[in-house]
């Protein structure tokens, strides 16, 4: 596998992980798109229970 890396900040976004080279060590962080707000569906809202369960399942990777 061949990767192209941005030289200016030593980061590589791959799937849902950001690989960071810092002091010759590889560090990992979660990758989020620029539009990620960190907000999720309120469980007390009036959405169908299937949507609420789907939100939780998406967060835990089921």
Image (tube, grey):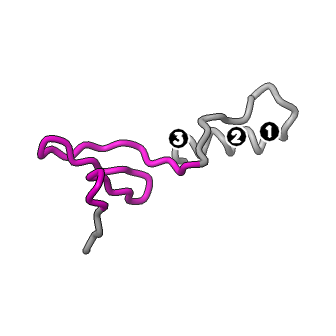
Check the image and name the residue furthest to the top: 44
Check the image and name the residue furthest to the front: 8
> Which disc, if any, is residue 53?
2
Q: What is the CA distance from the residue labelled 1 to the residue labelled 2?
A: 6 Å
Q: Do labels 1 and 2 touch, CB within 8 Å?
A: yes
Q: What is the CA distance from the residue labelled 3 to the residue labelled 1?
A: 17 Å
Residue 54 shown left or right of residue 33 in the figure: right
Residue matched to label 3: 60
Residue matched to label 1: 49
Residue placed at 12% from the left, 46% from the top?
24
Q: Do labels 3 and 1 touch, CB within 8 Å?
A: no
Number of numbered discs visible in the structure rendering: 3
Residue 21 shown left or right of residue 48 in the figure: left
Q: Give the range drawn in magenta.
A: 6-34
Quadrant position of the N terminus in the picture: bottom left
How crowded is the residue under tag 1: few (<14 C-alpha within 10 Å), some, or many (20+)? few
> Which disc, if any, is residue 17?
none
């Amino acid at each position: 596998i061949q990767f192209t890396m941005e030289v200016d900040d030593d980061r590589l976004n791959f799937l849902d992980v950001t690989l960071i080279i810092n002091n010759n060590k590889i560090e990992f962080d979660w990758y989020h798109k620029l539009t990620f707000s960190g907000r999720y569906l309120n469980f007390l809202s009036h959405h169908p229970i299937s949507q609420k369960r789907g939100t939780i399942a998406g967060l835990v990777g089921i």
